[in-house]
Image: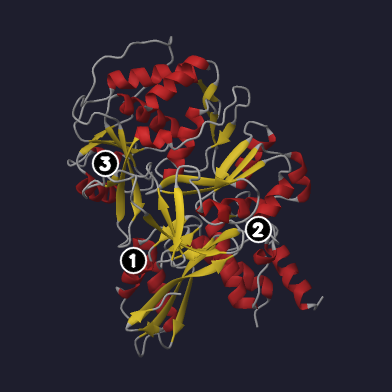
Amino acid sequence: MPEPKDKVAEIIRDILSKRGKNLDEVNPKASIYSDGLGLDSLDVATLSVKLEREFGHEPFGLGVFPRNIEEIVDFYKGKDGKK
Amino acid sequence: MLHKVFQRAATQNPKRVFVCDGDRRITYAEALNMVCEAKNSLPVTEGVYYFHLRKALDIMIPLIALDWMQCRSCVLSSEFNSGEILEIQREIGAGIVFSEDTDLWVTSDVAAIPRLLHYKSSEVGVEPVGVAGEGAIQRGMIIILTTGTTGAPKPVLYDWDTLVSQIRSTNTGEDFRNWLLIYPLNHFAGIQQLLHAVVNADTITVPKSRNFEDVFEALLRQEVDSISATPTFWRFFLGRMSKENSRAVDLKQVTLGGEASTQNLLDQLKDCFPHAKIVQVYATTEIGSSFSVNDGKAGFPRDYLKRPVGNVELKVVNDELYVKSPKRMLGYLGKQLDGQRDTNWFPSGDLVEVTDDRVFFLGRKSEIINVGGVKVHPQKVERVILKVSGVENVRVKGSANPIMGQIVVAEVMALQDTDRGELILAIEEQCNRELSRYEIPRDIKIVEGVEKRNEKITRR
């Protein structure tokens, strides 16, 4: 099982590459939005679909807008009650 | 008529700012001069004046001038490429294309002119000379592109008089607004925003971008006090806004349109902008601006079905909302123009639920997918995916999404012995090449079978 952090990073790298931005590494602390990695509303919609597919639920539908990869991972850790 | 309303605004409020774009502030008086100058310097054509430009002001000024010249204008998406523009010209007719795209300048079919208008400000009252096409059309018109059921853009024809008459003046003479321009001018909603501002002598502020940071910055500096945008825009905006941020800004007016608003979103907006008037507008390119709801509740009062409201009359037949509007489009270009606007009921394509006191929107009657206010045709997406080798069948449909309202998803049946991973990549590539960002499926699933009813693919 890949680490949630790696999986989330992979999903985001994949979304960015479709926009022509190819990154080898994404900083887990960098904002995923227009003040950082540059995801717009359509990209975030895609992210919500992919996260739901991967983890069974996703934060945005609950009104939670995580700022970066770390906060997305925290969301899942909190939800799953593992930490 | 647009030019007359504009002249009135400029005469009554010459020093008010018409457009604010970065450091540039153009007053109504200066803008009127630019309009006069454009009227004198625009090349003459009996055809259509197409605008393929990025800067809103570069479009707005000639639009007003061309109404004065009684010519036809058509604003194109700045994202169109030269092939798409040629296709549109073939459908709508030849004309002059104003474009920054140097590719277009060498295309022989397109009379392209580089930024021919160099605006400068001078005294008000320059008397224009030379009227192109005078008498030929009699009044200024605009062609607004929509997307039809087959997926090809449909050109909708309006005269400016009708469009201006749809706008209700809200200006009491004291309370001027400063609107942030969120909609592009090739959209009906963008043209409406322009007209609303001109009728009320309001200011239009052009944002650096539609990104949260730039919009928030404009709010913070109190440049703007009103924003009209889709529920998707607002959902994303509120999601990005923190509690502390929300206390720093306020708005006089929040307008929503293009998709149905949920009660949850309306409540959140009221919470975030406690002093704002929250207005939901119902408008389509074909019917035009129809009516608005200001009570902060989802849907609209059932009472609206019993009396004329806004610009229209409403009725519900078989759960579909029908609209009668004397102010709707003249017709689709190329089709027989419809002279019976007063008596004809127009099916809106929106399904509604009528309760004791309220009418709620349920979705579209057709299979059109509403992605953040942009209408996507599943058949068009299916045609593109079916081109990919290895695809046996495909079903494209909308899926509920917390950000965009709906997104496009595809269920693909693969031919035997096809590598699923490679197939998905090939589909993604094909879609990226041929579809706009809104049309590209955000999720592609490989399935064993595609659901059919009466040999027709079901999409809902």
Q: At x 44% / y 46%, what residue is drawn?
A: B312
What residue is shown with label 3? Answer: B104
Q: CA distance from mark 2 to mark 3?
A: 46 Å
Give the camera-side residue of B17 and B188.
B188
Residue with the most extreme right position: A83
Instruction: Identify which amino acid the numbered label 1 is placed on.
Output: Lys
What residue is shown with label 1? Answer: B380
- The nearer-to-camera label among 3 and 1 is 1
- The nearer-to-camera label among 2 and 3 is 2
- What percent of the width, then of the height, locates residue B174? 63, 22
Q: Earlier in the sequence, mark 2 or mark 1?
A: 2
Label 1: how many residues lie within 10 Å, few (<14), some (14-19) or many (20+)? some
Secondary structure under tag 3 reads helix
Instruction: Identify which amino acid the numbered label 2 is placed on.
Output: Gln
Give the camera-side residue of B51 and B379.
B379
Residue B456 in view here: yes
Placement of A9 over or under B325, stated as above or below: below
